[in-house]
Amino acid sequence: MFKINDNYLKLPGSYLFSTIAKKVNAYSEANPDKNIIRLGIGDVTQPLAPAIIDSLHKAVDEMGHAETFHGYAPDLGYEFLRNAIAKNDYQDRGADIKADEIFVSDGAKCDSGNIQEIFAQDNKIAVCDPVYPVYVDTNVMAGRAGTYDKATETWSDVIYMPCTAENNFAPDFPSEVPDIIYLCFPNNPTGSTITKDQLQGWVDYANKNGCVIIYDAAYEAYISEDNVAHTIYECEGARTCAIELKSFSKNAGFTGVRLGYTVIPKDLKCGDTQLHALWARRHGTKYNGAPYIVQRAGEAVYSEAGKAQLKEQVGYYMNNAKVIFNGLQDAGYTVSGGVNAPYIWLKTPDNMTSWEFFDHLLEDANVVGTPGSGFGPSGEGYFRLTAFGNYENTVEAIERIKRM
Ligand code: MLT
């Protein structure tokens, strides 16, 4: 008789955003007259920028003619896109990353879940707490997390690095040295970030202790302060200890288009083995590349018109962030984030748990947010709102919360 991967059975409940969607759907079915405003999952609402649409149309037309038709994409992505990424996201920032160190994919969620495959099962991972649930859940699926303690909502073999108001939402170095460190800055879910000097501290720590950092920079486009690094490769020594994950979802609205990339510098080695070679082998074996038309759309992100249009789009969402931040602060809430990230992190009032506040907000303001505890035990007592809604809904949501 076949056997299943019973690590899957250890996972408590369903994926956070699936649970929320179920709850909201149930409420909506029971209350069809209510106008629900969704500021829960970090999904964008603004249409694709004109430069991207133009590029998509052109690429679609190319696919309709034998001379310009494209079949399987190259394993690691088309050169035109990898060159644009290497230049704009790295070399122009003084970061030494070459096009052949970039692996194009269909999004950072898959990459952040799959990357653990190239590491041995007995590696110990460290995560910020709260954290994007994909990092932990995929290590659970791989059998790397140990056993789940329902009472503390933690896994026995995962090192948690609490990020709370007490440490300004910046993780401290863990007392036990991990093998793999997941970092995401600007951070999901807290919306806070760390300075370039602090990030340099993590790079130095990783190099000194033989750790690898998996650095999720999905929210990089939202950085507004000068002392924050746009890529971990701005830090000295990052080429020997860091993998970086990037998404086109948040900077260019590709949540429904799907495009991302992973950077693995060739200097990143375990003994003599390049992690680059392992990921290339994995990519070539399990993946047939992001679609040509989507990679052309990605290229347009780096065109002059694309850059200008996307700057405006990011500005639009960050204006929403301001509306949420200021509105909640005026209403007496304790808020953080929203300056270098499209997420606002608030303390739940009156000692409500995160899920109690979720229900309160849904029922009394018809606004959906994300309970902080869904991201880890240190998220308990916090709540996340996203700035990715449209402006009118965002203003209306905050008015309703103020009246609540
Ligand atoms: C979130 O809401 O945390 C994100 O949208 C999830 C994701 O990017 O996969």
Image (tube, rainbow, N blue to C red):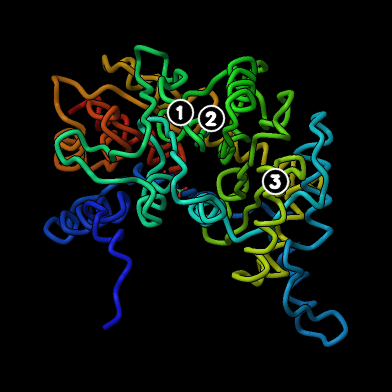
**Would you name the residue on which mark 3 appears?**
264
Image quadrant assignment for residue 372? top left
Task: Please state which of the two labelled residues, at mark 2 or mark 3, is closer to the viewer.
Answer: 3
Image quadrant occupied by the N terminus: bottom left
Answer yes or no: disc 1 within 8 Å of ligand 1. no
Q: Is residue 46 above or below residue 375?
A: below
| SS at badge 3 | loop
**Would you name the residue on which mark 1 appears?**
191
**Would you name the residue on which mark 2 appears?**
186
Q: For the residue marked with disc 1, what is the amino acid? A: Gly
**Dot 1 alpha-carbon crowd within 10 angstroms: few under 14, some 14 to 19, many 20 or more:** many
Marks 2 and 3, how far apart at CA? 20 Å
| SS at badge 2 | loop
How far from the left and from the top, in percent, is residue 88? 80, 40
Q: Is residue 138 left or right of residue 82?
A: left
Q: For the residue marked with disc 3, what is the amino acid? A: Ile
Q: For the residue marked with disc 2, what is the amino acid? A: Pro
